[in-house]
Amino acid sequence: MKKPSLLNIFFLFVNLLFLFHALRDYSKYPNYLKLLKSKEVLADTIEKLGVKNKDLEDEIERITNSKSYALKVLRERYHITEENEKIIFFTD
């Protein structure tokens, strides 16, 4: 019987190494899919936050440039009143 050559042993070792990594990486595929889904959710969240940020920047610009708009915001959001003015709240 012929002895296996050093080259054959090397190729066997490399093939076993590839097989080991292929089996080990197969269990990581579901994790990859979870990460891919998470990436999509995060990208969508970033897009929504970008729109919200732009709206807030516009709101700040309007408040900065218009005193009447600033007073309107103070009245509506923070219930700031002028002197001798009262606010009445109605409940349903």
Image (cartoon, helix red, strand yellow):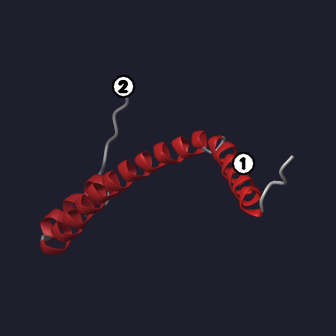
Task: Name the residue at 77% across, 59% down.
Answer: 5
The amino acid marked with disc number 1 is Phe
Q: Earlier in the sequence, mark 2 or mark 1?
A: 1
- Nearest the camera: 51 or 29? 29
Q: Where is 49 relative to 61, above or below?
A: above
| Image quarter of residue 79 | bottom left
Q: Are marks 2 and 1 in contact (CB under 8 Å)?
A: no
Q: Residue furthest right?
A: 1
Give the position of the C terminus as an image quadrant: top left
- Nearest the camera: 87 or 2? 2
Task: Name the residue at 59% across, 39% down.
Answer: 30
Secondary structure under the numbered disc 1 in the rendered image? helix
Residue 72 at x, y percent in the picture: 20, 59
Q: Residue furthest top?
A: 92
Residue 55 at x, y percent in the picture: 23, 58
In this picture, residue 89 sits left or right of residue 33 = left
Disc 2 and disc 1: Cα gap in Å? 69 Å
Q: What is the crowding at mark 2: few (fewer than 14 residues within 10 Å), some, or many (at least 20)?
A: few
Residue 92 is marked as 2
Residue 27 at x, y percent in the picture: 66, 41
Residue 20 is marked as 1
Task: Name the residue at 32% across, 51% down.
Answer: 48
The amino acid marked with disc number 2 is Asp
Q: Residue furthest bottom?
A: 64
Q: What is the crowding at mark 1: few (fewer than 14 residues within 10 Å), some, or many (at least 20)?
A: few
- Nearest the camera: 11 or 68? 11
Residue 82 at x, y percent in the picture: 25, 63
| Image quarter of residue 64 | bottom left
